[in-house]
Amino acid sequence: MSAVYRVDLDALARNLARVREAVAPAAPMLVVKDDAYAHGLEPIVRRAVAEGVRWIGAFDVATGAAVRRIAGPDVRIFVWLIGGRDDLAAGVAVDLDLGIGDEALLADLAGLPVEHPARVHLKIDTGLHRNGIRPERWEAALAQTSALVADGHAAFEGIWSHISEASDADDDDARAVFLAARETARAAGLDPRFSHLAASAAGFARGEFREDLVRVGAFSYGIRPAGGPSEGELGIEPIGQLSATVTAVDLAGVHLDIGALHGLPSTLAGRFDVLTPEGPRRVEAIGPTDTVLAPWADAAPGDEIALFGPGALFGVTDLAELVDTIGEEIALRISPTVPRVYVSAHA
């Protein structure tokens, strides 16, 4: 046996059902950036589509094209990291919804040959400064977009933005900018079919932010927010379990076949326990390629130990809070060299 990252696709399905319930009447958009939060793009997308997901947020055009190959023609795929003219052309070619937050991209779009209109979602910067068109440039961007629609280069599909989710007051201010931008667009003759502003946390907690779509990443994978409500309170469950195998037992302790080069942060050494056949034992050291646990009497090579996730003492966000980060950062660190094994009663 060796270290393995087990992904429970049935738990994913239950989370997707919970997300759908929580954000209704908005439609959920499953975010699959970074190889589906390191859980593996293809199995996650296939199961999500089988569960009725019809919007997927793919982050960049290359991922969007991969999702299109997996999901087929009937799923809407939204991307928002667009590098320029070539990215735009590639996105249009595979029928992606394009999140555009830069006037230069609108100019690039105007120069593309027209085969069919690009589906454009215009992004207003509501104060987070994570790209997006500044409010003082919004009317100019709307004029560019209107020209693109008029000449058949674009179909105006939506208005969207990110919010900080740092405080309700900050988010309320951001929403006011968003709503004003939408009214300005409507006055300019651009009425969006879809509005989307909220991600996981705001989508669950604040009904007024849900609009038509809610982009849900971490919660779909059972990753709760640091410092926020528990998985139980949210009604979600972790889908990924990182397990390692005992390789040796010596005077230093019990050695596992996973280390910092596999993505386990070395800063967690001495900070958490794992469950062994004889009860909890402290993780005493995390080296480049192995982890050392405090010993127990009958430890033997081949024993499997869960480090985080279902069946372990801690989840990814529990570990993240120990080192002042967020749960998805712990999940994303797990190296692709660690095999993913998919578990499902439907397999």
Image (cartoon, helix red, strand yellow):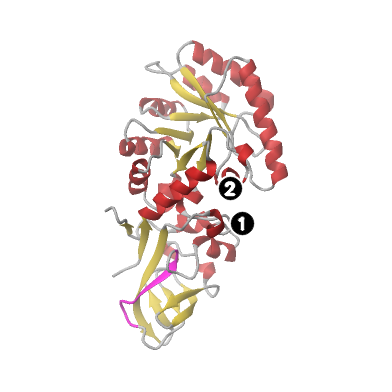
Q: Is residue 306 magenta?
A: yes
Q: Residue furthest top?
A: 151
Rendering coords of residue 18 (x, y %): 48, 48
Figure label count: 2
Local crowd size for mark 2, using a 10 Å CA cut-off: few (<14), some (14–19), many (≥20):
many
Badge 1 vs badge 2, beta-carbon distance below 8 Å: yes
Question: What is the residue that sits farthest to the left in this orientation?
Answer: 347
| Residue labelled with disc 1 | 228
Position of residue 269 relative to residue 216, above or below, is: below
- Above or below residue 288? Residue 191 is above
Kind of residue at badge 1? Gly
Q: Residues within 10 Å of mark 1 (few under 14, many from 20)?
A: few
Q: Nearer the viewer, residue 203 or 114?
A: 203
- Helix, strand or loop at label 1? It is loop
Position of residue 311 relative to residue 151, above or below, is below
- Residue 305 position by quadrant: bottom left
- Residues in magenta? 300-309
Label 2 sits on what residue type?
Ala
- Give x and y (percent) for residue 64: 40, 36
Q: Secondary structure at mark 2?
A: helix
Q: Which residue is mark 2?
A: 201
The residues tagged by marks 1 and 2 sit, at their Cα atoms, a distance apart of 9 Å
Examine the image and state in which quarter residue 104 appears: top right
Q: Give residue 322's position: percent from left, percent from top.
A: 58, 66
- Residue 156 horizontal/vertical position (percent): 51, 21
In this view, the residue in front, 45 or 49, is: 49
Residue at the image point whose x is 40% and y is 58% from the top: 335
- In the foreground, 216 or 122: 216
